[in-house]
Amino acid sequence: MPLIRLIPPGLVVAVFLVLILSAAFYAALPYRRRRYVPILVTTAVGVALGQLWDYLGLPALRLGQANLLPAIVFALAMQPLARFVPRPQPEPVESTPTSSSDSRDSDG
């Protein structure tokens, strides 16, 4: 139990806020060909900027230790940038030689 006491409650609220907001943005915003991971990343960056807003002491609407209003505004403002988040490209599968081409090489 002492390990749980080290985790600040605002961090738990912020993680849930990121997951809820990213799912809402993924479902509601009308973008074409979206993937969830870039939306999750930009939402996390937006919530982090909202927490920075609170850290600087600017006006905020708080839920426990988490800053809600600027976090939601920044997360929504970051969504058009989701298309610029780099995604890993699938590695191309190397083609294997077929048995018919191997038999022609051994004959000739």
Image (cartoon, rainbow, N blue to C red):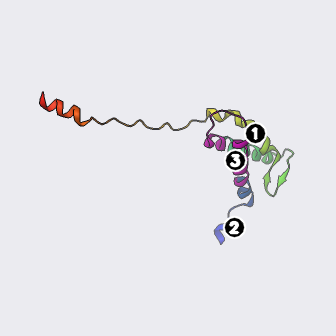
33 relative to 94 in the view: left or right: right
- Who's the residue at 75% across and 36% down the image? 77
For mark 1, what is the residue? Answer: 76
Q: Cα distance, mark 3 to mark 2?
A: 29 Å
Q: Is residue 11 magenta?
A: no
Identified by mark 1, the residue type is: Leu
For mark 2, what is the residue? Answer: 5
Q: Residues within 10 Å of mark 1 (few under 14, many from 20)?
A: some
Residue 17 in percent (x, y) is at: 74, 51
- Start and end of the magenta stretch? 15-41
Q: Earlier in the sequence, mark 3 or mark 2?
A: 2
Q: Earlier in the sequence, mark 3 or mark 1?
A: 3
Q: Nearer the viewer, mark 2 or mark 1?
A: 1
Residue 104 in percent (x, y) is at: 17, 30
Residue 1 sits in quarter: bottom right
Q: Residues within 10 Å of mark 2 (few under 14, many from 20)?
A: few
For mark 3, what is the residue? Answer: 23
Residue 62 in percent (x, y) is at: 83, 52
- Who's the residue at 76% across and 47% down the image? 51
Residue 36 sits in quarter: top right
Identified by mark 3, the residue type is: Ala
Q: Cα distance, mark 3 to mark 1?
A: 12 Å
Decide: marks 3, 2 in contact (CB < 8 A)? no
Name the disc covering residue 16, or none: none
Q: Cα distance, mark 2 to mark 1?
A: 32 Å
